[in-house]
Image (tube, helix red, strand yellow):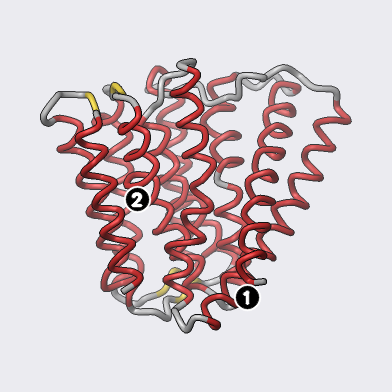
Amino acid sequence: MDFLFIVIGLILLILGGNWLLKAAVGFSLRLLIPKIVIGMTVVSFATSAPELIVSIRSALEGHADIALGNVIGSNIANLGLVLGITILISTISVEKSFYKTDWPVMIIASLLLYGFIAFDGELVRYEGIIMLSLLIVFLIYLLRFQKTAVVDEVPEDDVELPLYKDVLFLVIGGVALWGGSELLIEGAVGMAQKFNVSERVIGITIVSVGTSIPELAASIIAILKKEKAISLGNLIGSNVFNILAVLGITSIITPVKVTDEGLLNSDIYWMLAFALLVFPLVFAPVKMKLSWKEGLILLSLYLGFIYTMLV
């Protein structure tokens, strides 16, 4: 039953995030907001909605390890699993914005998270405010100086829908996210108790992989259709949002206190290692390209990480 709750919860989160995205883009087009602004703000927040809802509900219900494990695990999965599988299927070219803005900001965000939780094991309100402020500064900088670095992430069917459809997508998306997060957390906590594993392990494996499924599906579909360049920047942007927006907003609402030391002694170092590893892989052996060889390295390391979690 717990596993069923997790599966249904993840399906509702994915559908809810997609419906919310349609509504968000619809309202943005109605308000004549430029597509580049929609892609960087509205779309990014909407696609991070599943992680955000799960983290807030987990923290509020006293399951902070699921909240932190979800974000740390999602960031590892985005680079190890999603990027690994994507470049195994097809070689991708990396934009210059990778080393100019995307990667440096991801490293700053990752080190900031490490600094905030490594010493006292807790994310508190003022730290959340700092993280969210940094995200706002980053978005303003991109909009003013790096517009060309932003990949158009607005869905292909970005036509203005009738108002009632926008409202309908907003309502059913919100309800699906709420219901999905309830089922996912209940199933995850139940499974942790039943199999006598920590909530951190469930959060960093099942929950984080589940909330990374939309990124994986989008990447594979884009490759198969050969419609749209897969951007490493999109995955890195997702990681930045996970830390600065998801954990930032969560810790502003309620303190996030680590109870499982494994998050501090192991998991966060894995997250930093994957973030650092991407840089040399982009430049060697072929500059500004990622191919199946790099995919094999990332996927092997990700499987190694999961193995260390479960043994």
Q: Can you tell which mark lies on residue 114? A: none
> Looking at the image, which residue sits at the far left?
285
Amino acid type of disc 1? Glu
Helix, strand or loop status at disc 2: helix
Amino acid type of disc 2? Ala
- The picture places residue 311, in percent across and down from the top left corner, at 31, 74
For image coordinates 47% across by 84% down, the residue present is: 196
Q: Is residue 19 left or right of residue 44?
A: right
Q: Is residue 213 above or below residue 22?
A: below
Q: In this view, does 157 lie to the left or right of 249?
A: right
Residue that carries the numbered disc 2 in the rendered image: 109
Q: In this view, does 41 lie above or below 148?
A: below
Quadrant location of the N terminus in the rendered image = bottom right
For image coordinates 30% across by 53% down, the residue present is: 302
- The picture places residue 295, in percent across and down from the top left corner, at 26, 38
Q: Is residue 60 left or right of residue 150?
A: right
For image coordinates 52% across by 26% down, the residue present is: 153
- The picture places residue 303, in percent across and down from the top left corner, at 30, 55
Q: Along the line of sight, which residue is nearer the eye, 18 or 90? A: 90
Between the C-alphas of marks 1 and 2, the distance is: 26 Å
